[in-house]
Amino acid sequence: MSVCDNLETLRDSIPAACTLIAVSKNQPEEKIREAYNCGQRHFGENRVQELTAKYESLPKDISWHMIGHLQTNKVKFIVPFVSLIHSIDSIRLLEEVNRQGLKNNRIVPCLLQVHIAREETKFGFSADEVRELLHSLPARKLAHIQVQGLMGMATFTTDQQQVRSEFLELKMLFEHMRSSALPENVTMERLSMGMTADYPLAIEAGSTMVRVGTAIFGQRERP
Ligand SMILES: *Cc1c(COP(=O)(O)O)cnc(C)c1O
């Protein structure tokens, strides 16, 4: 199957209201061009250096998504062009994104990464921390970020029930946030969840953005 065939198959199984982000980490630029030539415009990367290199050499109408753990000292390299940072996992990081947003005269769209998996290693806020953070935002005066929603990764397991309940948990937090009074710089319209192994479950649970790599590009050279 070619990249284009894979994209077409995926588009058939994803509702129109859900954005497909092609996760191109560890994939060569020619594969991204292939997807681009089949109409794909949203791409996701998890490393700053790779993201900026690809941004520089690929067409400028691509929307680049940062989906991996982001170090504070690297924020400045992506803020000028990134279209959405999915992986905000600390207040310090959010404050640095705001600082760089100010320097670049832009409002940077962000998602808060929520820890929903059983695994210890995944980054992200707890549900309580998300609530606290939103509560503390007005006082922080971060005029150059916009928190557009939440992102999460389910446990890496074949237990579908487990994965489903983790996605539903995130969806409930998302809906809870949406129905509360939100600070000016928070909109809560995007829910980023679902990867190759679990995107159908994520869509069922209400995902508005799926981040799919392997099902589009095949196995990565490096994991
Ligand atoms: C790699 C990655 C994906 C895509 O994984 P696949 O299993 O290849 O679809 C999605 N989200 C994040 C955060 C990733 O790091």
Image (cartoon, rainbow, N blue to C red):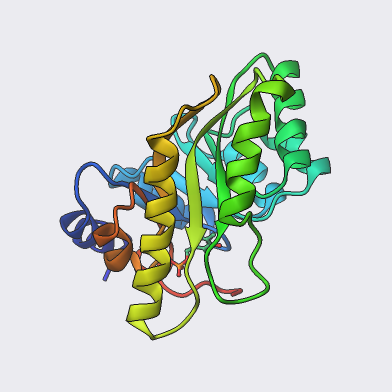
Q: Residue furthest bottom?
A: 158
Query: Closest to the observer: 17 or 216?
Result: 17
Rendered view: 102 above or below 15 = above
Name the quarter where the C terminus is drawn.
Answer: bottom right
> Is 68 left, or right, of 95 in this rendering?
left
> Is 82 left, or right, of 208 in this rendering?
right
**Place of residue 65 in the rendered image (x, y in percent of width and height, measured from the top left):** 52, 43
Q: Residue at x 44, y 30 (%)?
A: 61
Query: Closest to the observer: 36 or 127?
Result: 127
Query: Closest to the observer: 14 or 120?
Result: 120
How many discs appear?
A: 0
The answer, for residue 197, to whether it is visible in the render is: no
- Name the quadrant containing residue 56: top right
Q: Residue at x 26, y 71 (%)?
A: 1
Rendered view: 13 above or below 118 = above
**Place of residue 72 in the rendered image (x, y in percent of width and height, measured from the top left):** 80, 43
